[in-house]
Amino acid sequence: MFERLHSQLTIQKMLGLLIGIGFGFCLQKGGVTSYDTIIHQLLLTDFTVIKVMGTAVIVGMIGIHLMKSLGWIHFHTTTGSVGSSIIGSLIFGVGFALLGYCPGTVAGAIGQGQLDALVGGAVGILIGTGIFAHFYPAINSKILSIKIFSAETIPELIHLPRWIVVILMALMIAGFLLFLETNSL
């Protein structure tokens, strides 16, 4: 039994590594590992980042739900909250605004040899993780449990089958990306 489990975990890790390398390749080829591209996104003058990430969300959302439907993967969700969403958004937003990279793009930028991403990004992620871990007990008891959501997933929240929600979300994101492509804001 343990040999089979170990074999499956090894395959999962290898697939995860390969998919991660592929995603990093797509980020780099899409231009979103460039500091200038990200800054222009923040200034709302270049929507490359939204286009690449929106496409990644569509592919990932459909892929995850397809693999789950086929029984290839099993995952669990946890209940979120308004407090955890606010803390997560603040940490991500402050880091993104200060550095000009998000965690995914900083990894891609490090991979292409950008020293600012290595020093500022990797070191910043480690320091930020350490600070969050240090204050986690206080944050967890006072903030993360504020207004816990009534459902773990959007389909559960709106009482619709998962595939209907996946298709509707994919169409909405694709429509928004098409709008960005055809209209200059």
Image: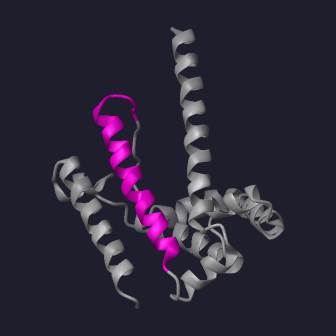
Give how far across and how far down residue 43 sits, in percent. Answer: 56, 89
Quadrant of the rendering where the C terminus is positioned: bottom left
Give how far across and how far down residue 38 sits, in percent. Answer: 61, 77
Q: Main secondary structure of the magenta part?
A: helix
Which corner quadrant of the image does residue 121 belong to? Answer: bottom right
Q: How many marks?
A: 0
From the viewer's perspective, is 66 left or right of 24?
A: left
> At x 33% / y 48%, what residue is drawn?
62
Give how far across and how far down residue 26 sits, in percent. Answer: 56, 56
| Colouring of the image | one colour
Which corner quadrant of the image does residue 105 belong to? Answer: bottom right
> At x 51% / y 74%, what residue is drawn?
48
Give how far across and how far down residue 46 sits, in percent. Answer: 52, 83
> At x 55% / y 59%, what residue is drawn?
140
Residue 44 falls within the magenta-colored stretch: no
Q: Nearer the viewer, residue 134 or 159?
A: 159
Q: Nearer the viewer, residue 68 or 54?
A: 54
> At x 16% / y 54%, what residue is drawn?
159
Residue 51 falls within the magenta-colored stretch: yes
From the viewer's perspective, is 2 left or right of 129?
A: left
Q: Is residue 161 above or below residue 149?
A: above
The residue stretch that appears in magenta: 47-74
Residue furthest left as drawn = 160
Q: Is residue 167 above or below residue 30?
A: above
Which corner quadrant of the image does residue 15 belong to? Answer: top right
Q: Nearer the viewer, residue 63 or 122?
A: 63
